[in-house]
Each structure stands twice: as C-alpha cells, then as structure tokens.
Amino acid sequence: MKTYTFHVTGTHCASCKILIEDILGEQSFIKNPKVDLKKETMEIETESGESPEELAKILTEKIKPNGYTISVEKNIQEKKNDLPAQTGDVIWKAIPIGLGFLALFFLLQKSGILNLGIGGETTWVTALIIGLIASVSSCLAIVGGLVLSLSAKVSQDNISDTKTFILFHAGRLFSFAVLGGVLGLVGSAIGISFTFTAILGIIASLVMLFLGFNLVGIFAKNKITLHSGIFQKMTSTFRKIEHQTWTPILIGFGTFFLPCGFTQSMQVVALSSGSFGTGALIMFAFALGTLPVLALLSFGSASFAHSKHAPLFFKSAGVVVIGLGIFALLGGLAGLGIINPLFSI
Amino acid sequence: MSGTRVDRDLLLNGMNKTVYIILAFAILVVIGIVFSGGPQTTELKQAVEIKDGVQYITIEAEGGYSPRVTEAKAGMPTKLIMKTNGAYDCSASLVIRSIGFQKILPQTGEEIIDLGTPKAGVPLQGVCGMGMYSFIINFS
C-alpha cells in the first residue's frame, strides 16, 4: 500500500470534494481518497504498481467528465478567484441589482397589464398569446425562477450548457405536446391534482432557494466544510444528477406540472378538446409562447456566465432566485392551506 | 503615487458599498409597498344579494379576486358565485380548503359553489392555486 499526493484542478466548490471522493472511492484499486480543497491536492492509497503519472492519467479519465483534472505537478494557471477584494464588493452590487429586477417583476404583476382578459374560443393562436403572457406573469416566479437558477448553476459548473439548455427546451416543448394530447384523448378521466402541483411547486421553490444561496455564495464561501451536513449532501447529489443527459429533458417534462394558473387553464382547454391532435396543438402552442422568455433566461445566463461580469451575474441571479423562491414557497404553502396567504399582488 | 491611488480606490469602494446598501433598502421598501397592497384601491362594491331566502355572494376572478373582503350574513343558506371573464391566470384555479373545493374555473362564465349554511365568526377563504391571490368572506 502506497500513498500518493496529486494536485487537483477544477475544484471550485465545496461539493467537488465529495463528488471526487465518491467517484474515486468507487474504484477498486484505490483506498481512502482525500481531497484538500484549500491546497487543491488529493491523497490516495493504492496497491497498484503504476507510476504516479500513469495513476494521474487514469484517475483524470474518471473525473474529467465532471470538469476536474489530476496531475502530479501543480498546474501553473492561477485561479481567477484569487481576487478577494473584488468578490467581496460584488455582493453589494448584486443585492440592489437583484432586488431591482424583483421590484420590476412584482410591479409588472401589480400593474394589471397582464390581465388582458382574452375572450372567445381558445385556439392554438390564443394559446400562443397566453403562453407569451404567462412567461412574464407570476408563473415566471416558479418556472422562470427554476430555469434561471438551474441555468446559472449549470453555466457556473462549466457543463456544456448550450446542449443542456437545448435538451431542456426541446424536452419541454415535446412533453407539453404529448401530455396535452394525452389530456385531450383521455378527457376528464385524469384531473391534475392541485395538491400535487402545489407540493411540486414547493419542491421547486426549495430547489430555487438552495441554488439561489449557492449562487450568491453563502454555502460556497468556506471551501473547507464539514464532511456531512444536509447541504453538502444536497450539493453533491445535485452535482451528480446535473451531469446526466436525461436531467434537463426530465425537468422540461416536469414543468408541465408546476403550479401556474395559465398552464392549468390550458390543460383544461386541452382536456375538453376531446382529441389528441387539438390537445397536443394547444399545449405545444402554449409552450412555444413561453419559449422566448425562458430561452432568453437560459441562454442569457450562459452568455453572462462566460463574460467578465460573471461573478456579478451569478450573485445578482442568486438574489433574484432567492426572492422568487421565497415568493413561490409562501404562495405554495398558502395554496396548500398550511399558512394564511401573506400577500396578494 | 500608487499609494494615494489605492487610498482613493478604497474610499470610492467604501462609498459605493454604502450607496449600494442604501439602494438595496430603497428597493426593498418599494417591494414592501407592492406586497402590502400599495394605495388601497379596493372598490367597496359589495356583491351580496338575498333572493328567496338564499344568500348569493358574487366574486369576480381575473388577475386576482374582487372584492377581496366580503361581509355576509351567517346562518342562512349561502351560495358563492365565481364570475370569470377570460381568466387564464392563477385566479382561475381556485382552492377553498375549508369546504374542500378545488377547481379550475371556466375561462368565461360562472361557477356556483354551495357553501351550505355558514356559521358566524368562521370566515371562508379562497386562494388561487399558486397562493398569490386570495379572498375572504366574513360571516356575522
């Protein structure tokens, strides 16, 4: 049994430690992988007779998909996060920016501009327009908040974000069409339960809060963290599922069930349409209407994330997401009758 | 030279920070006003009618509920009429927990909900599916 120490790059968050240790711990020839985030080093015990260089290569293969590399020599590229003065100030800038967006959003809801009152029969054209309205309405608090938080997180974790976002949006459009068709086909046989959507909404808002705090950097502040702890576990689990191809598609599918008055109204229209084709068309048109804003949120996140304003963007997005998360959480709890409605916008 | 430069930058940063904090507070106040309902414009058009010994309460649902607070009589058969006119937003998905009512209201039309004979002092609260709109009916 020999002990080796390697240098690790790409460990930008506390959860990376757990993720790397998990992945390497699964390898049979390695014992007790220990990552030191502060020094950016890693210690392993092994009985394998490979040279350190070979080992580094083999191990890098295992964790490369997650964005880490292991080397014998310290990589000379200095980490950009060694600018404490600047990052310390960014949060003060980010709070008013984030709050500003929140204020605009709530004022827009309050203004009543969005209550157009579209009458008449619901065709796919009306569904498209309603989708457009819905995408800036209070539904944005849940669906948009979720998209923004996930997109920012995905971009921050350096995952191939464009592919992820395309999968999400395609998955969303496709599932809306199929589920809309199914609703039309089975008619009133299935009703989507309010309690179910409300619980889903609460889960979504908790994810938003968690990601929001993560983006703002409250959990990631101390790179050295406790071994266990629920947030560590959550981050670790989150990072694992984040890298799967099916995750964005599944989340796109899940948005069908998120609580949003507009979506639910459209579901009723699809339900009463009585045919697969009409139901599918209506839900697809609705999802298509919501696409511009949601696409802007995700691809906008990506382009900001790759610009020099990235730290400011992540923190501002975090503030926005926390605000929307609180809003959605309180609303969801009120919808379930657990608390009294605290507000009415 | 560089020393003074750094001092000035530090000072500026410090000032910026104060400005940002003040700004953040100002925006928080705005959000607070939005949530607390802002200038109260709730029109007091109470829609409680008694016909043939039955009390009918009408509430309009579209971009929220109106009126938000209704005063009604207790101890008599009561029906709640939810009126919609092209409502696609959250207010169309109505939940009234106390009577176990959950339904997506028709986009345009009326939904009549039987409230039985309400007791005095037990208010009835309706919330939209996402919980951001609500109304309350007080019985006395």
Image (cartoon, helix red, strand yellow):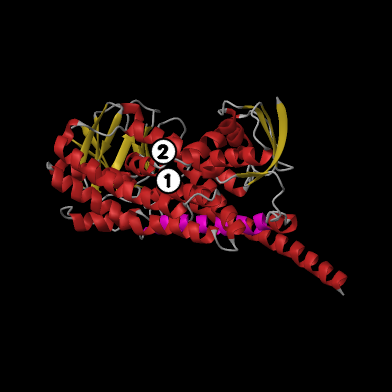
Q: Secondary structure at mark 1?
A: helix
Q: Residues within 10 Å of mark 2 (few under 14, many from 20)?
A: many
Relative depth, front residue between A45 and A38: A45
State yes or no: residue B132 in magenta. Answer: no
**Front residue (pair A315, A69):** A69
Q: Chain of mark 2?
A: A
Query: Pointers 1 and 2 in contact (CB under 8 A)?
Result: yes
The residues colored magenta run: A90-112
Counting labels gives 2
Extreme residue in the left direction: A274
Q: Hey, which quadrant is residue A127 in on the image?
A: bottom left
Residue A130 at what x, y percent from top left? 28, 55
Tell me which residue sits at (56%, 35%) in the image.
A236
Label number found at residue A211: none
Give x and y (percent) for residue A330. Answer: 48, 39
Disc on the earlier residue, 1 or 2: 1
> Residue A102: within the magenta?
yes
B20 sits left or right of B53 in the view = right
Q: Position of residue A271 (x, y in %)?
A: 18, 40
Q: Could you tell me if residue A327 is visible in this image? A: yes
Q: CA distance from mark 1 to mark 2?
A: 7 Å
Kindly identify the residue that appears in the image at 69 percent across and 51 percent down. Answer: A75
Residue type for callout 1:
Ile
Residue position marked by numbered label 2 in the rendering: A201
Disc 2 residue type?
A: Gly
The residue depicted at 48 percent of the width and 44 percent of the height is: A327
